[in-house]
Image (cartoon, rainbow, N blue to C red):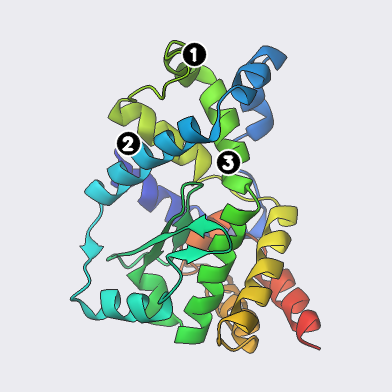
Amino acid sequence: MNRREVLRHCLLALGVSAAAPVSAFDLAGALGAAKSLAEAATLDDAELNAYYGQMSAQMDAQSRIAGAATAYGKRLALLTKGLGRYDGLALDFKVYHTKEINAFAMGNGSVRIYSGLMDIMTDDEVGYVIGHEIGHIKSGHSKKRMQLALAAGGLRDAVSASGGQAAVLADSQLGELFEKVVRAQHSQGNENEADDYAMAFVKGNHFSPQAAVSALEKLDKLSGGGGGGGGGWLSTHPAPAARAARMRESLA
Ligand SMILES: [Zn+2]
């Protein structure tokens, strides 16, 4: 399966994963021996960021980016104005031009929003998604996954042989890493944490707080159709209905 087929597969699998959350990647299984954990702990932030950098460079190279001169690019630039440095993070925003309804963030501050998601959401709702993704970065969710993934399987040798410097990973290894770090489903606890961050984010950045609710309700409605229309974001960010209700409560 090449990368595009994998993405399509994730979309097709969405109806299933939304109804019965099964992690695409068994994190516990990937932990392996305790030794792997100990090795993971030795990776410092600079090394982790170097791996994120390689991963996002590969994804960017494989994707069709809606540039600054396009309508999508201009819209995202407006929505993220002044957010290049935010809450102690250095952030980098780009639009991937694809019908897929998705967005993801990496621990090095890369935030990628898919045009398919922008098509179905208002500016305020995209603001919520941006806040949610920043929340995952700020809370270190993907960093933990990255440490575990690098300590597991075929990547462990490459990493431990690199002696404190980030190894240059092959395309296939970066692909494996992407699946394990970005394409894996977040836990409900992580989702709630990122949602709470997003709620504070929209309130503090002139987006409508109500948009956190309406964005999640929109995704829930799409997933209920059973056609996989909820898009990739739901496969990694589960349970939109419960989260919408939770966000609604936090508005009161
Ligand atoms: Zn999430």
Question: Could you tell me which residue is drawn at 47 percent across and 63 percent down?
Answer: 85
Disc 2 residue type? Met
Neighbours of disc 1 within 10 Å: few (<14), some (14-19), many (20+)? some
Dot 3: few (<14), some (14–19), or many (≥20) neighbours within 10 Å?
Answer: many
Quarter of the picture containing the N terminus is top left
Quadrant for residue 53, please give it. top left
Q: State the quadrant of the C terminus.
A: bottom right
The amino acid sitting under disc 1 is: Ser
Pick whichever of labels 2 and 3 is earlier in the sequence: 2
In the rendered image, the vertical position of residue 59 relative to residue 98, given as above or below: above
Percent coordinates x, y for residue 110 in the rendering:
42, 54
Mark 2 and mark 3: span between their CA atoms? 26 Å
* Residue at the spot 56% in from the left edge and 26% down from the top edge: 43
Query: What whole-number distance in Å separates the C-alpha atoms at marks 2 and 1?
Result: 28 Å
Please say if 110 is above or below 175: below
- Image position of 40 (left or right of 115): right
Dot 1 falls on a residue whose secondary structure is helix
Residue labelled with disc 3? 143
Camera-nearest residue between 163 and 199: 163
- Residue bearing mark 1: 160
Front residue (pair 135, 218): 135
Judge whether 191 appears above or below 172 on screen.
Answer: below
Q: Is residue 225 visible?
A: no
Mark 2 packing: few (<14 Cα in 10 Å), some, or many (20+)?
few
Residue 194 appears anywhere in the view:
yes
What is the x, y in percent for residue 188? 72, 56
Residue 79: x and y in percent read 42, 79
Q: In this figure, which residue is indicated by the disc labeled 2?
A: 1
